[in-house]
Amino acid sequence: MSWTGEQLFSSKKQDWATPCALFEEVNREFNFVLDAAASSTNAKCSLYLDVEADALTKSWSVISKGKPVWLNPPYGRSVGKWLQKAYEESVKGCTVVCLTFARTDTKWWHDWVMKAAEIRLIPGRITFVGGESAAPAPSCLIVFDENRRMPTIKTQYLPRK
């Protein structure tokens, strides 16, 4: 399936599966035990939460026993809720690594991503599993971990007249 403007802006398809090579590279560093937004066909960990599990209402830190959590949230208007949850779970003691679009102009980016320990920008555009072409926007990894604080990234607001 190719990306279309309709998919990008209408949220018709929200469950773009993580490319295996990308996950394997990041997993070598973090050793994830829980995939917090998956299905039986795209889960990256043997322990995963699917739509029926309603992951936003569960305690990822309890389920993962404080071990690292992988999150490729649904792409759509709810992404801010997923990143808020990832941040909140990191405050409870587990590392949460999220793959999402680098949307620095959005409210959710400034409300939640800017609280991350690390933001890793991915050069170029990745091709998600099932996509025939690269994603229509740049992607990034967001690492929420209260024990991994890195250099600060701040927002500089422009004066408005």
Image (spheres, rainbow, N blue to C red):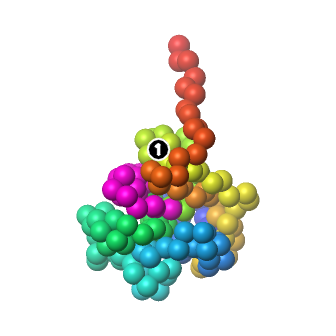
Q: Secondary structure at mark 1?
A: helix
Residue 126 pos. (x, y %)? 67, 66
Where in the figure is residue 31, as x and y percent of width and height? 53, 74
Q: Is residue 150 left or right of residue 45?
A: right
- Image location of residue 41, percent across then percent down: 47, 86
Q: Please, what is the dominant secondary structure of the magenta stretch?
A: helix
Left or right, 120 with respect to 51, comes to right
Q: Residue 39 vs residue 123: left or right?
A: left
Q: Residue at x 61, y 74 (%)?
A: 28
Query: Which image quarter is the N terminus in?
Result: bottom right
The answer to if 42 sits in the magenta stretch is no
Q: Indicate the quadrant where residue 55 lies.
A: bottom left
Q: Can residue 32 be seen in the rendering of this structure?
A: yes
**What residue is shown at x 60% (from left), y 56% (from top)?**
140
Classify 99 as above or below 33. Answer: above
Viewer-side residue, 101 vs 23: 23
Q: Position of residue 105 (x, y in %)?
A: 55, 40
* Residue corresponding to mark 1: 115
Residue ID at (33%, 56%): 92
> Is 144 placed left or right of 88 in the picture?
right
* Residue 83 magenta: yes
Q: Residues within 10 Å of mark 1 (few under 14, many from 20)?
A: many
The residue type indicated by label 1 comes to Lys
Residue stretch in magenta? 80-97
Q: Quadrant of residue 46?
A: bottom left
In the picture as drawn, the residue positioned furthest to the left comes out as 57
Which residue appears at 49% of the width and 73% of the height? Answer: 32
Nearest the viewer among 39 and 2 is 39
Q: Residue furthest front?
A: 147
Q: Nearer the viewer, residue 62 or 6?
A: 62
